[in-house]
Amino acid sequence: MRRAVAVRLSALLAAGALTAATGVALSTTTASAAAGGVTGYATQNGGTTGGAGGQTVRATTGTAIHQALCSRASSSTPITIQVEGTINHGNTAKVSGSSCNTAAGVIELKQISNVTIVGVGNGALFDQLGIHIRESRNIIIQNVTVRNVKKSGSPTSNGGDAIGMESGVRNVWVDHVTLEASGGESEGYDGLFDMKDNTQYVTLSYSVLRNSGRGGLIGSSESDTSNGYVTFHHNLYENIDSRAPLLRGGIAHMYNNHYKRLNESGINSRAGARAKVDNNYFEDSKDVLGTFYTDAAGYWQVSGNVFDNVTWSSRSGDHNPAGPNPTSNTSVSIPYGFTLDGANCVPNVVAQTAGAGKGLKVSDGSCTPQSPDPTDPGPTDPGEPTDPGPTDPPAGTNLSLGAGADGSSKASGTSYGNVVDGNTGTYWSPSGSTGSVSVKWGSATTVSKVNIRLASGSGTIGAYRLLNHDTGAVLASGSGAGTVSFSPASLKKITLEITNASGTPRVAEFETYAS
């Protein structure tokens, strides 16, 4: 393990104006959502929908959060918990129930699934209190601040991790959060964002991690290599000593992040890990990529990064930086679509979008921040009727007829080929509520319009993206079924990626048109 390094704090954290409140859980009839759409590896393995389609409650204390979890019909009943106010040790008690396994002094998401925790109103501050995810799956955490969680001193919580995941965790999306400490291990702090003991399919997006000795790790030791498939994008790492992140085994994808003042080391790929590092901006930092504090080598694929006032140490012993001119020493295949902002605009776009309280703004893929689409709210009322799509197809020839099809997953008894057979009585469904299906051709084909038809009994598509599978570019996004137009694109494969749904979608036809 790396020796402790005192963090170099350049500014004290603000005390925060939020005050503790008595928790009250209020039932509502509509569910609020993780807006902007899940991205990265959290879209894989059936996708991440959190509490979509379930009840929404409001909580202003940690005890109320636990009560909301424990009041569900089962440990997998979907729920969205809207949090406002300061959550701290004084208002976070253990609550018992058959649908939960909680503890005092920590927000415990243990042995549960299908949960969204989202900050609302004047904001949600978890003050000296960590969020622990254990033996759980399909979790969304959004628009919250977690501050000054300690593993030593007083009070302690969550082993010193702001957000920690362990023991078979699957499909977690953490988005627009702010994770802060006030020093390193010698001051009582540990990691801001840790994953260990077989944690997979995680995305951290549009978030701020700052003023800590350790940004986070993927794998707790050189033998803990069952973790991985993690995406980090549009995040700010600022004033971090090391572990931005530390990756032991597994695969991670880092793109469009702004790394500022990494004091000792940055992305530490080791023990056979593979990191894909695309279009990031590294600034005023040291040894931002490499294998450090071990002789168990890791690997990286680099492209489009900017190194602004980055210094590199000489290679010696267990210290092997990738610079001063980093080159790729592996190749990493990414299974999901993504659009890269140019690295030079990353500091600006991240400054406007990353962290809690930024209005959930995201990048449009061309360096321009934008607010979430109000027509893409995510989870919908479970009583909403299915939209079967238009009865009349667009004019012209359906190019999907006779084309091939594949996808990320399919439910038992369904087929990818059913979306290109011209028969609305057959359909493809993902193995869960989210997934992707593609139409493909042997040669480049120009497409500018898509018509999605849903079969009878289908769940509702809450959010989707249409991707140029050849390049990863997003052609269009929206919700529901029907026809969507976009700028003509010449491609061999087009993908419908369903990122949010109420129920299980049944896509009868994925029609494509030239105009």
Image: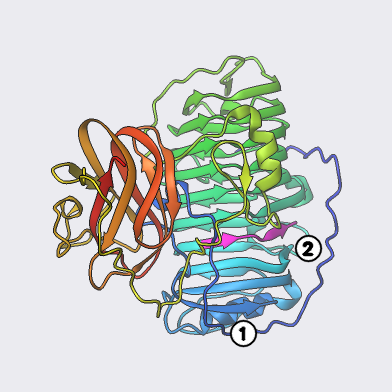
**Which is more toward the observer, 66 or 369?**
369
Please identify the residue farthest to the front as the structure is shown.
Answer: 395
Q: Which mark is residue 154?
A: 2
Q: Taken as a whole, is the magenta stretch helix, strand or loop?
A: strand
Q: Nearer the viewer, mark 1 or mark 2?
A: 1
At x 16%, y 55%, the residue is: 418
Residue occupying image coordinates x 38% and y 52%? 484
Query: Residue 409: x percent and y percent?
Result: 26, 53
Displayed quadrant of residue 62: bottom right
Sequence-first disc among 1 and 2: 1
Magenta-tinted stretch? 140-148
- The residue under label 1 is 26
Q: Quadrant of the C terminus?
A: top left
Q: Amino acid at mark 1?
A: Leu
Disc 2 marks which amino acid?
A: Ser
Check disc 2: other Cα within 10 Å, few if <14, some if 14-19, many if 20+.
few
Q: Nearer the viewer, residue 159 or 258?
A: 258
Identify the element where label 2 is drawn.
loop
Q: CA distance from mark 1 to mark 2?
A: 33 Å
Would you call the spot at circle 1 few (<14 residues within 10 Å), some (14-19), or many (20 or more)? Answer: few
